[in-house]
Amino acid sequence: MNKFLLNLLVFISFATLASAQDFSYGKFTIEDVHLKNYKNDTSAHAFVLNEFGSSRIDIAADDHLKIFFKYHTKIKILDTKGFNKGNVAISFYDSDDTHDEVIDIKGVTTYTDENGAVQIAELEHSKIYTTTDNKYWKTMKFAMPNLRPGCIVEYTYTKLIQGFGRLPSWDFQDDIPKAYSEYEVHIPAFWTFNAMIRGPLKLTKSKADIEKECFSSHGSKCDCSYLTYGMADIPAFIEEDFMTSSKNFLSAVYFNLEEWTNPYSGVKIKETKEWKDIDYNFKHGDYFGSQIKKNLLNPYIGPVIAGKTTEVDKAVAIYRYIQKNIKWNDIYSRGSDGVKKALDKHTGDVADINLALVAALNSAGIKTDAVLLSTRGNGLLNTLYPVENEFNYVIAKTTIGTETYLLDATDPLLPFGMLPVKCLNDKGRVMSLDKPSYWIDLVAKQAQNTTSNLDLTLQANGKLKGTITTYSMGYAAYNKRKEIKKFNTADEYVENLDEKLVRTKILKSTLTNVDSLDKPLGEIYEVEIDVFDNLNHNRLAFNPVLFDRHTTNPFKLQERTYPVDWGVSSNDRYTLTMALPAGYAIESSPQPAGVALPNNGGKFLTEFSGADNVFTYSNVIQFTKSVYAPEEYPYLKELYNKIISSEKAEIVIRKK
Amino acid sequence: MKKVFTVLFLLGCAIGSSAQSSYEVSKIPKELLPYASAIIRDENIYTQVDGGNTLYHIKKAITVLNKNGNDLAHIVVWYDKSNVIKGIKGTVYDEFGKLSSKFSEKNFEDQDASNDFSLFEDSRVKHYIPSIGSYPYTIEYEYDLKSKQTLNIRDWKPNPYPGLAVEKSSYTFACKPDFTIRYKEINMPAKMVAGYTKDGIKTYTWQLNNLKAVRNEPYSPIKDTYLSTVKIAPKSFVYAGISGSFINWEQLGRWNYEKLLANRQALPPATIAQVKELTKGITDVKQKAKKIYEYMQGKTRYISVQVGIGGYQPFLAGDVDRLSYGDCKALVNYTQALLKAADIPSWYCVVEGDNSKISMLDDFASMGQGNHVILCIPLKNDTTFLECTNQKIPFGFLGDFTDDRTVLACTPEGGKLIHTPKYTAAENLQTRKANLVITADGELSGNMVTIYKGTQYDNPESLVDETAKEQVKALQKMYPHISNLNVEKLDIKQDKKEMPVAMETIQLSARDFASADNGKLYFSLNPVNRSGSIRDVRNRTNPVYINRGYVDEDEIVYTLPAGYKPDMEPLNVSMSKAFGKFKMSTVFADGKLTFKRRVELIDGTYTKETYPDLVTFYQEIADTDNYNMVLVKSN
């Protein structure tokens, strides 16, 4: 993944002052108006002709420090499928104590009317609406007027961002291509930011200049570093199935405040520059260290571990207790408002729950650390230098004996020691309270495994009768439990299954370990399956893969740009043992198949063995890795082709 | 009745003070438990019209039995400037009816109610998800809602969702004795009891006990036909400062026309001139209208705009003319204005837009039965309906969103109930003919022509106006059972008639379509049009309802590799039932295998006893669709 990540430190070089690079508003060329497609991507429904952004830290009219973020874009809309680019929504932060603003919205549509004349329609201010999304966010919305295929929409606005900590990032890449995109930042020397460029695309312009005395406030003055990042001919970003966060692959530049000097007092304040700084903040923060350090949960824990002797038993009991007693409110977080409060209210966010778990385990004398991570949807962490904001989740890590367990108590169906797939995202940072923080790999301990055994006898009436036994393990068991819990009772689950499998009658069912999360989940069904109307034929053919046959290939594209990422490895085994009625014998059977992915990446195998009137067919589908590189894609696709064609083959039996 | 009301009130107090025991889960009648994820223990809705306002007091206690019931206990309250909520609060009880926590307005999440891109002025939602770690639990809550109008009175639906049982529920509508109402009961087992409060307020009360949870049954009729509802409509009302009265559709339509629609159609002279120019020389009214409609389609785009009078009034035609966008009301109003400029009269029609065919109730006029508007041109013997929010849809074609249902036309002569066109099973026809060659090493190649008609016209829409690259991707998804599908040529033609036709022609190839195994060659006989099976439902309660019929006809002629023949007897299946017919045949002759498949589904309502037949019907189709052909070398 590191090849997508390129670090670029901001430093001040010595050049003369340069002027703003924004392109002029409301100007268009006749060539642009008459363009029929985009030469670099003829499949585009719209593309950006030019895009410009500028961020500047400065003193606002109200004498407060603000970031002035100016945005300006000009988009050519080629056909009606590009019309959504004329619907604009600008979100801004507006909470009790922080009020960002969006000002100076201007927009214009240039289009050709019915008579072929070029017309201009301005965005009307009365047609701009502001909505409150929630207590933190507002959105300004407007629809550009008079869209026609071939029109050009252009708009600009300025966002005033309170303070100086939230310097906007810039996405060079979007779902439509861009001919050119440029972002400049003006940072007074009082502030130092890290800039980080992500994505595989190369900048076509990168400049660092000095602006003399660009900032002054109440007598203090300083120069600014003036940085320009430009990119030309940016292709559209096209999402593929089974990929992680597009953020990992989109070309963009991000900024993170490293340190700053108070312009009035001259005091230098280090923002998080090194891990030891972050460690310190977390250890002493009310929202983190304090929640773990104090034995806040002692009174709760006593009864939970009463009678438990081994550390593992205690740990499991505490884990179950937290899982059951705090319901996750679907909010991700890395800091808690109070673990005790969460436990009392029976509800909390990720940090409330998992820091409560860390605290509770420590209370019981089981040494446990919190681990910060970024979920798959939130994108990969950079491991070059610390950025606190990149973390959006926290879990617990404990070692008992020689075994290390990673724990997430937000989901009551997770077994002890299993992380949800969303957390399996490269690395996590262990925030130990008594030693420096360090990285660990977040990989699944468990796979997604199933084994199915069908033991069936073909009856004289053409029906198959016997037992189907399926065991689901690891992530497969977790998913199956989620499925079962959708029903009010296990009986309703079986009834639904029975109703879904029209040709199969479930005569008796046993589900085992539905609530014993650490054990494989078993489903044992006594069934009768309708295969043939009768046996009045000399020859009968049937497919030995009776259920969930693969008939379509999940991979349809010719080639792939991004890795296939399933999160976990998997292994599925299927075995059918079948007895034929007297007087029948096997005429022909499928050939054994065997395909493997390179580097032991996985395989598909089938076997057939039979003598007389009993035979066994089995197949194994195995993916040993959770992530496959684009180079491995053709093999993956071919493996599925093989599975599909092999699962078409039939067994023919005939009357002796 | 006065007494009854006071007694109820006192009872309420009594329950409040001895709350411990009343919500004990063990007290739920056993017969309410099957298929229930949650149970309404006690619901009281009190609606009162007071001057120009409608006041609601909602009080509800619901026991959640398991995780699935959480959503049913999720409290969602919509509000905006003219619908104000007050005093929302509640209490949570545990399994034994013991109080475990309380909550109030500050515990609610407050959110913008619009999703996607919508220019909303101010419509918001407050919601609260009870956070209880373990089941079962009971949540009791109440709030007041003030709606600053008296036109639209909310329906009472005591059991609105599957999986929800009702132990006790009551609804009271209260108003001054001179405030005349009409009401309509649908599947209402309870009898209305009329009375007066001690203050001389007239009341209408319904009370229900022990309603079992409804199960989700596939192919059920439209929900409103089997769930219980009480609808109430005022005779006289005030809405956004405009007063009016109605007792039937004629009057409601007239009010709509006169108060909300009239005088909103002025167009700039240039546009009027443009319309005249556009229709110059055309004598046929319908052709004129078509020209104008297509002009409107080319000029505008749909954007949801929930502003104006309570979302019922379109914004001015002049605004649409200038901005080239609008919501359904604005675009219908604008199209109407353009037609008027060419002296073509048309009607603004309120409709419930949905894939299910939901009609305005013939015998009960009330506002709020529709969520969309379309335009009707009342031509003699040739009434034409126009969907104005879609830039691509053919003139006069409605598709499956507004077809075959009763709508309210708001005309200068008053409201009229009219019916939109129905597309019959025979009209919704898809026919496919393919000539394909399979080689001995399994490669497939050939061409395939598919014609889509009626409501199936839309099926290949994702291919239209796309580049070859995107079309191939879309085709690979449309025909997923041809692995390694390679499209050599695609042609898509749309004939935008009133009964539109789309034609898709593909030149295709696919390696490894047939796979060799043990000297045999296997391939799927029907890789292009597959139907799924449906879930069986034992002890079904609802009749079988097929919302829309269709006919699919497929014919594939496979040229088999030389020297091969089918290993088994040819597959021939046919079935004929009241609701549909199915026939599939294969014939092998002269090295060619001809596969034919015809499925016809006829819309209508059938008895619940028909359901097992429908399950078998679909299963039979699914099984034959999944059939793998086996070829052997002939000696």
Image (cartoon, helix red, strand yellow):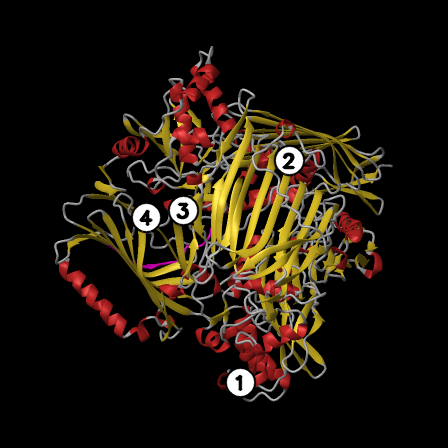
Q: Mark 2 sits on what residue? A: B584
Q: Is residue A14 above or below residue A178?
A: below
Q: Is residue A559 above or below residue A467?
A: above
Tag 1 secondary structure: loop
**Nearest to viewer (mark 3 / mark 2):** 3
Going by the numbered disc 1, the residue's amino acid type is Asn
**Nearest to viewer (mark 1 / mark 2):** 1
Q: Earlier in the sequence, mark 4 or mark 3?
A: 4
Q: CA distance from mark 1 to mark 2?
A: 73 Å
Which of the chains bears the disc numbered 3? B
Query: How far from the left and from the top, in percent, is residue B32?
Result: 38, 62
Tag 3 secondary structure: helix
Mark seen at residue B223: 3
Q: Which residues are magenta?
A: B206-218
Q: CA distance from mark 4 to mark 2?
A: 42 Å
Q: CA distance from mark 4 to mark 1?
A: 59 Å
Mark seen at residue B187: 4
